[in-house]
Image (cartoon, rainbow, N blue to C red):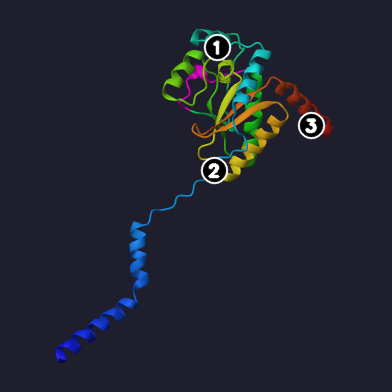
Amino acid sequence: MGAKKILITSSMFLMAIAATLPAFAATRYTTRHHRAHVRRVAWNPVLRGSMDSMVRQNEEIDRLQLPRIADNDQLLELERTQELIPIQESRALRINPSLQADKKYCRPWCNQFLQDMSEAYFKEFHTPLQVNSAVRTMEQQQKLRRHNRNAAPEIGEHASSHLAGITVDLAKRGLTRKQHTWIEAYLKNLRDQGLVEAAEERRQACFHVMVSDRYTEWREANQLADKIARE
């Protein structure tokens, strides 16, 4: 009889101890087996690309009667005649080292845009803007599409505007939030004035920017206005 009382008492004692620990036990079990909830952030860039934008880029190429550069022979000829001019590195502008030497070219007004934007960016952040890509050939674009299904085609109304030398890709990897927002605002301002077609590309980690030749006239008007203001 005494042994039975001891057994009952021990059982009650253990149950009392267990009652003080349910939260811990449950927490451990739940933590171990609970599937983590991953919050998905919607991709909603200020500069959203679209098929309509690609059509407008090709309409601009047609308006300017520019060729889509077929191969390296045609590319080198346009560089020789200075219809395409070299992009020059400076304290404000850096070129991706992996970009081939004969692809570091663009149309003169596109080069003006790069000079202006990179200087403004450097003035704000004291670090250079980087160009990842500029002119391409149809031959190069075709090869690019073999391993990048998101690359634009080399022909048609949605063809890449890189083929005419009026487009550059600006690097966005490594940007701070403030730098990213600044670039968005700068490009949106020009886009709203019909001077560029710009899109933030997610998978390629860059801003794709096609520049209209109207940029030159706009730039000269601004420079004249600044000169008059200083006098």
10 Å crowding of disc 3: few (<14), some (14-19), many (20+): few
Residue 226 is marked as 3
Q: For the residue marked with disc 3, what is the amino acid?
A: Asp
Marker disc for residue 69 = 1
Q: Position of residue 99 (x, y in %)?
A: 48, 23
Identity of the residue drawn at 45% across and 50% down = 38
Q: Position of residue 29 (x, y in %)?
A: 33, 63
How dense is the environment of label 1, judged by Cα within 10 Å: few (below 14), some, or many (20 and up)?
many
Q: Earlier in the sequence, mark 3 or mark 1?
A: 1
Query: Which is in the foreground here, disc 1 or disc 2?
Result: 2
In the image, what residue type sits under mark 2? Ala
Residue 229 shown left or right of residue 199 in the figure: right
Q: What residue span does the magenta drawing correspond to?
A: 97-107
Rendered image quadrant of residue 108: top right
Question: Where does the C terminus fall, quadrant-wise?
Answer: top right
In this rendering, which labeled residue sits more in front, label 3 or label 2? 2
Instruction: Name the residue tied to disc 2.
Output: 42
| Numbered badge on residue 46 | none
